[in-house]
Amino acid sequence: MSHASLFDIAATVIGLAALFGYANFRWLKLPPTIGLVVIALFTSVSILLADVVVPSLGLGNTVRSVLGRIDFHEALMKGMLSFLLFAGALHIDLKDLAERRWAIGTLATVGVLLSTVILGYLFHGASIALGQPLELGLCLVFAALISPTDPVAVLGILRTIGIPHSLKAKIAGESLFNDGVGVVVFTIIAATVIGGERHGEISGVIDISALFLREAVGGGLLGLGLGYVAFVALRSINEHNLEVMITLATVMITYSLALALSLSGPIAVVIAGLLIGNHGTRLAMSPTTREHVTRFWALLDEILNAALFLLIGFEVMAISFDGSTLYLSLAAIPLALVARLVSVAIPIRLLATRRRFTRGAIRVLTWGGLRGGISVALALSLPAIPEKGLILAATYAVVIFSIVVQGLTVSRVIDRIVPAE
C-alpha cells in the first residue's frame, strides 16, 4: 500500500469519526463510543440494503475494498492498543489497585481461565445442538478471545457513568490486566490447536508454562524497567513539550520491544503507564507538565477511541451470516454472559470470606464486563481455516451486543442494585 493510499484511508476514518461524532453529539446524545458504533452499524446496514435494492451501485464492494486494505489486527494490536492502554493506565490510582490487588489479580487470571473453559464447553455443546458442530479446541479458541473484557470499551463507558469508587477500581483494574492475560491465553490455545504462521506451534505443559511466564511476567518486568527509565528522565528536566515526547516515546519503544522479544506488549505498557501516571506525575512533573501530559493523552485517547469504534461498526461489512451461522452467533451472546457470571462469581465468593465486596458486585462485574476491538482483532488474526468465518461472526455478535446493549444499560443496572457510597 502506498503512502498516499494509507493517508487517504486514515483521512476517511478520521473524517467519518468526526462526522459521526458530531451527529451523535447533536442528535443521538449517546456515550461517544456507543454512538459511533451505532451510527457506523446503521450506515453499514444501509449500504448492504442499498446493494440489495440497487446492486448496480456497488457500494458494498467499494466499502469492502477499503476495509480489506486495513489489517484490523495489525492496526489495533500493533498500533492503537499501546496508546489506548497507556492512556487508560495513566489515570488509574495505583493505591486503589494495591488495595484491591487480590480481587483484580484473581479476576484477571483465574477469571479469564475459568471463562475460557466454561464458554468453550458451552459453545461446543451449542454448536452440536444447532447442527454446526465445531471441534472443542476451536471452541476454546473462540472462548479465549472473547473472555477478557476490553479495557478500551470498559474505560470509555466508566467515564460516562456514576459508580461507587471501590467497584469502579475493580472493573477498571481487571480490564487493564485481563486483556494482556487473555491475549497470552489465546496465543497459547491457538498455537496448540491451530498453529500457523502468526501463532506458531507449541505442545506440552512445559512449553505452555514457559510461554505464559515469558509473555506475562517478562512483559511486566519490561514495562517496569522502561517506565522507571522514563521516570528518571522526566524527573531530571522541566520542559513540558519534551516530557510529553518522552511519554510518547516510552509507549512506542516499550510496545515495539515487547513484540520483538515475544513478551506481552499490553501488560508492558500498562505497567509503564501506572508507574508514570502515579509516581511520574506526582514526583517527576511540574504542575504545567502534568497538565500538558494529561491533556495530550486525553486527546489522543479520544481520537483513537473514535477511530477504533468506527471501524468496529463497519467490520460487519466483512462478515458473512447464513442461517446456521446466525443462530450460533446469537447463541454465543447468552453463553458468554453465563461464562462471565460464573467466572466472576467463583473468585468473588472465595475472596468474600476474607474481604468485603460492594453489594451487587457480581452482577455489575458481569454486565459491565464489556468486550470490544481486541476480541475482533484476535478473531481476524486466525489463519484461513474453514471455521474462521463462524468464529468471527460469533465474536462480532458478542462484541456488538456488549458495546451497545450492555454499554447503554450498565448505568441503570448499577443504579438499581448498588448502594451509593
Image (spheres, rainbow, N blue to C red):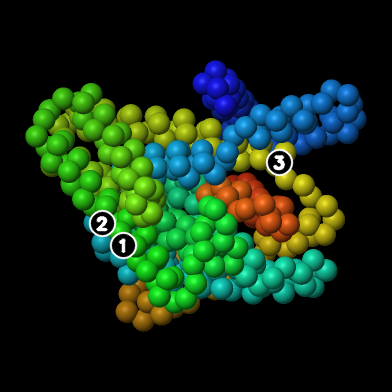
Residue drawn at (41%, 80%) of the image? 350
Q: Which mark is residue 221?
A: 2
Which of the 4 image quadrants contains residue 419?
Answer: bottom left
Tell me if mark 1 has few (under 14), some (14-19) or many (20+) residues whose alpha carbon lies within 10 angstroms of its own. Answer: some
Which of the 4 image quadrants contains residue 28?
Answer: top right
Image coordinates for residue 79, horizontal then vertical, percent: 45, 38
Residue drawn at (77%, 47%) of the image? 320
Whether residue 132 is situated above or below residue 268 in the rendered picture: below
Which of the 4 image quadrants contains residue 106?
Answer: bottom left
User: What residue sits right under mark 1 in the picture?
Assistant: 217
Asked which secondary structure carries label 2, the reply is helix
Look at label 3 and name its amino acid.
Ala
Quarter the N terminus occupies: top right
Mark 1 / mark 3, whichever is N-terminal: 1
Q: Are marks 2 and 1 in contact (CB under 8 Å)?
A: yes
Asked which secondary structure carries label 1, the reply is helix
In 3D space, how far apart are the residues under numbered discs 2 and 1 (Cα atoms)?
6 Å
Mark 3 / mark 2, whichever is N-terminal: 2
Q: Residue furthest right?
A: 53
User: What residue sits right under mark 3 in the picture?
Assistant: 318
